Image: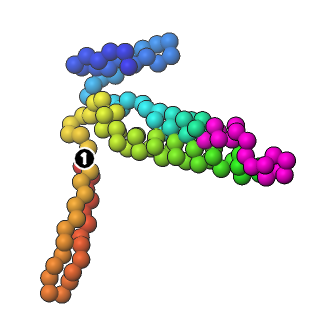
Amino acid sequence: MQSVTPGSITLATGHTNAQIALDQVQAIKRVSHRTRNGLLIGLGVGIIPTLGPFGDSESGAATALHFLVPPVVGLAAGALVGALLDHAKRDSDLVYYKGRKPTTTFGVVPILSATRKGFALNMSWR
């Protein structure tokens, strides 16, 4: 995005610029790479234990699992952390939204009567 005026947005597309009327734009989101970065950091952290000696090298106790498990666990943990960060910061990635910003509500209501007991769950997206 190169510039924003009250009536239009100018985007850089390769070697040319595209001007789009603001009334045609529904939302503008910032691109984030938190999940990818978390995955790469987790892989890096997971590879570190594989660089050291495992088990007794004379008896061959260092199996393939010793070298595969830490990076896989690191990948999973890094992806989870990145996904949680994406989820937590998704509202700050929304730069512009036409009209009212979308919201999600979640409610839990107890049901107490002579014939029924329990909970009612209510979710709405607006």
- In the displayed structure, would residue 9 be above or below residue 121? above
Quarter the N terminus occupies: top left
Q: Which residue is located at x 26 percent, y 66 percent?
A: 121
| Residue 47, image x, y percentages | 64, 39
Q: Which residue is located at x 30 percent, y 23 percent?
A: 21
Q: Residue furthest top?
A: 15
| Residue 38, image x, y percentages | 50, 38
The quadrant in which residue 40 appears is: top right
Q: Which residues are magenta?
A: 46-61
- In the displayed structure, would residue 95 be above or below residue 88? above
Q: Which residue is located at x 42 percent, y 30 percent?
A: 31
Residue matched to label 1: 103
Q: Residue furthest right?
A: 58
Left or right of residue 65: residue 120: left
Helix, strand or loop at mark 1: loop
Left or right of residue 68: residue 28: left
Left or right of residue 52: residue 103: left
For label 1, count other residues whose C-alpha is less than 10 Å away and answer few (under 14), some (14-19) or many (20+).
Answer: few
Relative depth, front residue between 98 and 37:
37
Q: Amino acid at mark 1?
A: Thr
